[in-house]
Amino acid sequence: MAKIVESLKRLSVEHSTRKPDDNKNVKRKSELVSCLEEAVSLDHNYILAICGTQSDPEFRIGTALSDHTCIIYSVGESVTQTITLSHSKAPIVGIRFSPTSRNIFYIATNDGQITACDLRAKGKVIAEFKDSTEDGKMKPLCSFDMSCDERLIAGGTEHIGGDAFILFWDIRHSNSKLDDKNNLLGGYWESHMEDVTSLAFHSSKQDILASGSTDGLINVFDLTQPSEDSALTYSLNTESSVDRIGWLNDDNLWCTTHTHSLQLWDCDGATPYAKFERANLAISQNDDPDNCYVVRCHASNALEQPFLLAGSSNIKGENLRCLNIINDRLEVSHNMVGNKQIVRDSWLHEKSGSLITVGEGALINIWRQTETNIQQNSSHKLVAKIGTGKGRERQHRTKPY
C-alpha cells in the first residue's frame, strides 16, 4: 500500500478531540409532509439508491434504478428530470455526486467498475476506475465511497476466491485517461472474511475509512499507514451482518444490519453503546415487528437532531417515521404523512431540511416539516455515549455467527 501513502503524504489531517454534546434540541412529535412526489418509472423498477448535492437554493439528486439506469433531477419549487444515464450494464451498487462539483456523478456497478460522468456533456464518461490486475478478471463490487477531498476512491468487493477486497484508486491519476490500465493503487484483503457491503470515509479526515461486511465486522483504517495490518486501527464485532455504516461524529459510528437492527459504536468500544433490535421499531400498536424495517441513519441536525428513518407495513398502508433515541429507547420525532411505498434509501438536504426518499414504488418523495416548535430535552443521547467498554484485541476476534 506504499502507493496509497505516497498519494496522501501531502495531505494534512486534524485529529479532533471534540466530544459529543449530551444536550440536544429535540423536536417533539410532529409531521413531515410529502410536498413533492415524482414517479420515476412506469415499468415496475425499484429505486435502489439516492444521493444529492448540498447546493442552495436549487439542488440536484441522482437516483439508481433496478434496470441499471440512473436519472438525475433538479429540485427547486418542482422536481425536473435533467438527464438519464443508461450506459451501465450491471446492477448499480452505489452512486455519489462529486464533493467538489455538482456536475460530476460517480456510478459503481457490480461488474467491478466505477465511472465518473460529466452532466454538462450529457453524462459523458470522463474517467473509469477498475481492477486491472494481470488475470483480467474484474472483482464484483458491493459498495464504494470517496474521500471528502475527492482524491481517493474505495470499492468493496464480494467474497471471491477466498478473499474479500477493499480496492483503492487515486482520482488524480485517472482524470480523462480512459485507456489507463494501471490506475489501481492497491487493496486490502485480510481484514474481512465475507462481502464488503458498506464503505464510509470520514466526513473531514480524508485518510480514515470505515468498512462493514456480512462477516459482522466494522473495521476502521488509517490509510496513511504502510501496511494493512498497521492501518487496521479498530475492529468492531456487531455479531450480525452489516448492511450500512456511517459516521456520527469524529469517533462514533452508526450501523444498520440485514436483520433491521441499529447499533451505535464508539471506535474504542468493545460493544455498541446503543443497540436496538427489529422489535424495537414496532412503535405503534398496529406494527408487526416482522413487517418493520430500517432505511438509514442521518447524523445531521437539519431536523434539530440526528434520526433513524424506519418504516412498517400493515393493513392501513406503508408507514414511515423518523425515530430518535430518548431515555435509551426509540421514540417518534416525525411521522411521515402520505407515504405510498416501501422505502429503500433516503438523503437529506441540510439547508432546506428536505428529506428525500425513494423505494419500491418507483417514487421520489420530498418531505418537509409542518411545524417548527423546538423544545429542550437533555435526555437525548443519540450521539452521546450511554455505555463504555474496553477496546478489543483485534487479533483475537471471533466469527460473529
Image (tube, rainbow, N blue to C red):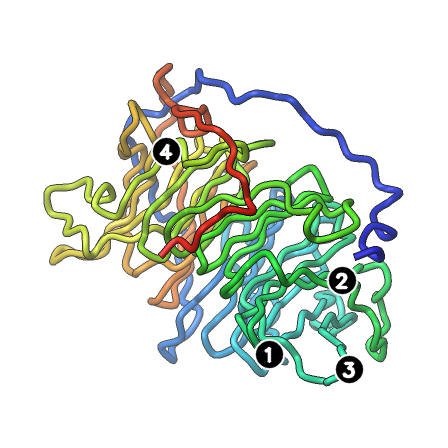
**Which residue is tagged 3?**
134
Give the quadrant of residue 271.
top left
Q: Amino acid at mark 2?
A: Trp
Residue at the (83%, 36%) spot, across then down: 12
Quadrant in the picture for the C terminus: bottom left
> Which is closer to the viewer, label 4 or label 1?
4
CA separation, marks 4 and 1?
36 Å
Q: What crowding class fits label 3: few (fewer than 14 Cα within 10 Å), some (14-19), or many (20 or more)?
A: few
Q: Which residue is mark 2?
A: 169
Q: Is residue 40 above or below residue 204?
A: below
Labels 3 & 2 near each other (Cβ < 8 A):
no
Mark 2: few/some/many CA within 10 Å (<14, 14-19, 20+): many
Spot occupied by residue 363 in the image (x, y as percentages of width and height): 39, 63
Tell me the residue that label 4 is attached to: 274
Which of the two marks, 3 or 1, is nearer to us in this view? 3
Q: Is 178 placed left or right of 89 in the picture? A: right
- The kind of residue tagged 1 is Asp
